[in-house]
Image: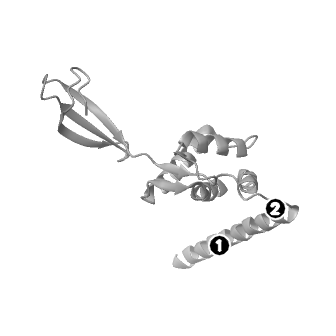
Amino acid sequence: MRCPYCRHADSRVVDSREADDGQLIRRRRACPECGKRFTTVEEAVLAVVKRSGVTEPFSRTKIIGGVRKACQGRPVDEDSIALLAQRVEETVRAKGAAEIPSHEVGLAILGPLRDLDEVAYLRFASVYRSFDSLADFEREIETLRAAARAREEDGAEAASAAGHAQ
């Protein structure tokens, strides 16, 4: 690492600390030439491989933009969208790969978006999965209904079990 003060080509690491939940590493460095200290920040770059083969850096901003479009006109606040984008990034980074296909980023968005707003989920899924017909929408809506019925049944069983425990 080149010294920003005297431009000497080398420096020594004095201290290293993780920041931003382990996404960044801050290093305190000292220049052996001029003796001055400076800080560097290292970030692990996560690359997204698009269908065309082009690679670009992961962007939480792009996730927010896509989800915001799907949520347009829906009762979803900006904080919820930002939280969803953070969850997606955490999910994608947890895979531990330096490069991830864009398809996997889309899959990581679908689950949290379904939990956030089903209409926004349908909008996003229709574009992401390239729905071609009403049948595609009907299939997806039936999947959502089946999941809702399963949640209701699980909730009823839990309430019944709690009632018997008293």
Tag of residue 164: none
Mark 1 surroundings within 10 Å by alpha-carbon count, few (fewer than 14), some (14 through 19), many (20 or more): few
Q: Is residue 160 above or below residue 43?
A: below
Which of the two discs, 1 and 2, sits closer to the camera? 2
Question: Which of the 4 image quarters holds residue 126?
Answer: bottom right
Residue under the image location 21 percent in, 20 percent down? 6
Residue under the image location 56 percent in, 79 percent down? 164
Question: Which of the 4 image quarters holds residue 69?
Answer: top right
Q: The disc labelled 1 sits on which kind of residue?
A: Ala
Mark 2 surroundings within 10 Å by alpha-carbon count, few (fewer than 14), some (14 through 19), many (20 or more): some
Name the residue nearer the viewer: 16 or 163.
Answer: 16
Question: Which of the 4 image quarters holds residue 139?
Answer: bottom right
Q: CA distance from mark 1 to mark 2?
A: 28 Å
Q: Secondary structure at mark 2?
A: helix
Q: Which residue carries the number 2 mark?
A: 137
Name the residue nearer the viewer: 92 or 157.
Answer: 92
Residue under the image location 55 percent in, 74 percent down? 162
Q: Secondary structure at mark 1?
A: helix
The coloring applied to the image is: one colour
Q: Which residue carries the number 1 mark?
A: 156
Which quadrant is the N terminus positioned in?
A: top left
Q: Which label's residue is closer to the chain start, 1 or 2?
A: 2
Q: The disc labelled 2 sits on which kind of residue?
A: Phe
In the rendered structure, the answer to whether residue 83 lies left or right of residue 117 reads left
Q: Is residue 67 above or below residue 159?
A: above
Q: Is residue 90 above or below residue 39?
A: below
In the rendered structure, the answer to whether residue 122 lies left or right of residue 94 reads right
Name the residue nearer the viewer: 84 or 77.
Answer: 84
Q: Is residue 71 visible?
A: no
Q: Position of residue 84 (x, y in %)?
A: 57, 48
Q: Position of residue 128 (x, y in %)?
A: 70, 55
